[in-house]
Image: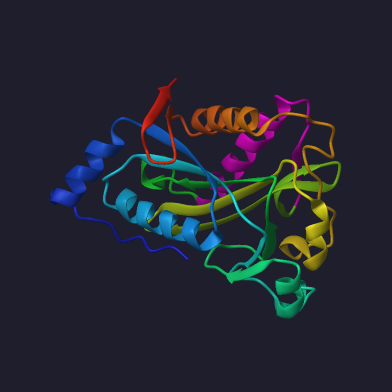
């Protein structure tokens, strides 16, 4: 659901927003292993700052411990295990306000949370999702993986198997949540769900024959994400200190 309210023109918040966005920067941070709850709190704090123009666009990379999340449109029948079974397997469960149905996050998966102000790009939710898909497909191509779309399905696919899932939330045209790319993910954990409500198989970069390291994949994702959204790349460490600009 969209909440299109924003600071009025001429207010100090509006002026700050204009100043922060004028540089068209994408700040990228790899936060490493972070619990889902902690990552959600970080997103919410940064999204509020982005709405008020206090920071430029952000792209956060994280890896979550085993967790299953269910979006606003999720159906209970797509969770194939009881809460007791999930706990026994070391898997947390979180309902969430992103779009989409149910998905799994865990070690070996690269999760990206873009926090972008679409007022400074296009006020078009479908275009945003399609552009995220394009960035993922172009990044995968660097590693010899020919990924594409499946008509009527969100995400990125290879030979009918989903390699990356997408689920976003947009408030006052600022995005949160994002995508999950199966890098070296243990795909057996998807047995607990019907991924995204679709009875289609999943795959990973590793299963597709790629031996690319995490840093290589993050670099490719950062480059292509900045390119497709026409932003200058600004890489930061997990504390926000600059580690290089390209």
Toward the top, the furthest residue is 246
Q: Name the image quarter holding residue 88.
A: bottom right
Q: Residue 142 lies in magenta, yes or no?
A: yes
- Tell me the quarter of the image containing the C terminus: top left
Residue 73 sits in quarter: bottom right
Residue 4, image x, y percentages: 35, 60
Residue 188 location (% of width, % of height): 83, 56
Magenta-span inclusion, residue 235: no
Query: Who is closer to the viewer here, 36 or 196?
Result: 36
Question: Is 158 left, or right, of 153 in this rendering?
Answer: right
| Position in image of residue 51 (x %, y %) | 31, 52
Tell whether 25 sits left or right of 94.
left
Residue visible at 48% across and 34% down in the picture = 229
Residue 118 location (% of width, % of height): 41, 46
Q: Looking at the image, which residue is at 48% across and 41% down?
A: 59
Over which residues does the magenta segment extend?
Answer: 125-151
Using the image as rendered, state which of residue 74 and residue 246 is in the foreground. Answer: 246
Q: Which residue occupies the foreground of this view, 201 or 227?
A: 201
Q: Please report the residue visible at 71 percent of the width from the left and 78 percent of the height from the top.
A: 83
Relative to 190, say whether 211 is above or below. above
19 is higher (above) or lower (below) than 201: above
Name the one closer to the observer, 172 or 202. 202
Colour setting: rainbow
- Does residue 195 sit above or below 134 in this rendering? below
For the image shown, how many numbered marks are present on the structure? 0
Magenta segment's dominant SS is helix
């Amino acid at each position: 659901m969209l909440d299109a309210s924003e600071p009025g023109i001429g207010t100090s918040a509006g002026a700050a927003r204009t100043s922060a966005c004028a540089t068209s920067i994408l700040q990228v941070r790899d936060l490493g292993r972070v619990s889902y709850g902690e990552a959600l709190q970080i997103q919410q704090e940064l999204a509020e700052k982005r709405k008020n123009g206090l920071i430029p666009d952000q792209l956060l990379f994280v890896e979550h411990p085993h967790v299953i999340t269910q979006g606003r449109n999720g159906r209970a029948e797509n969770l194939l295990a009881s809460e007791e079974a999930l706990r026994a397997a070391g898997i947390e469960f979180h309902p969430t306000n992103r779009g989409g149905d149910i998905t799994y996050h865990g070690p070996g998966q690269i999760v990206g949370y873009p926090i972008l102000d679409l007022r400074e790009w296009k006020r078009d939710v479908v275009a945003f999702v399609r552009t995220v898909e394009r960035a993922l497909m172009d990044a995968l191509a660097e590693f010899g993986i020919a990924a594409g779309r499946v008509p009527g399905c969100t995400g990125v696919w290879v030979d009918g198997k989903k390699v990356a899932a997408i689920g976003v939330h947009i408030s006052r045209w600022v995005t949160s949540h994002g995508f999950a790319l199966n890098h070296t993910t243990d795909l057996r954990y998807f047995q607990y769900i019907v991924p995204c409500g679709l009875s289609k198989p999943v795959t990973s970069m590793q299963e597709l024959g790629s031996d690319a390291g995490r840093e290589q994949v993050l670099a490719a994702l950062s480059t292509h994400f900045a390119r497709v959204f026409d932003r200058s790349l600004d890489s930061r460490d997990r504390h926000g200190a600059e580690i290089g600009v390209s």
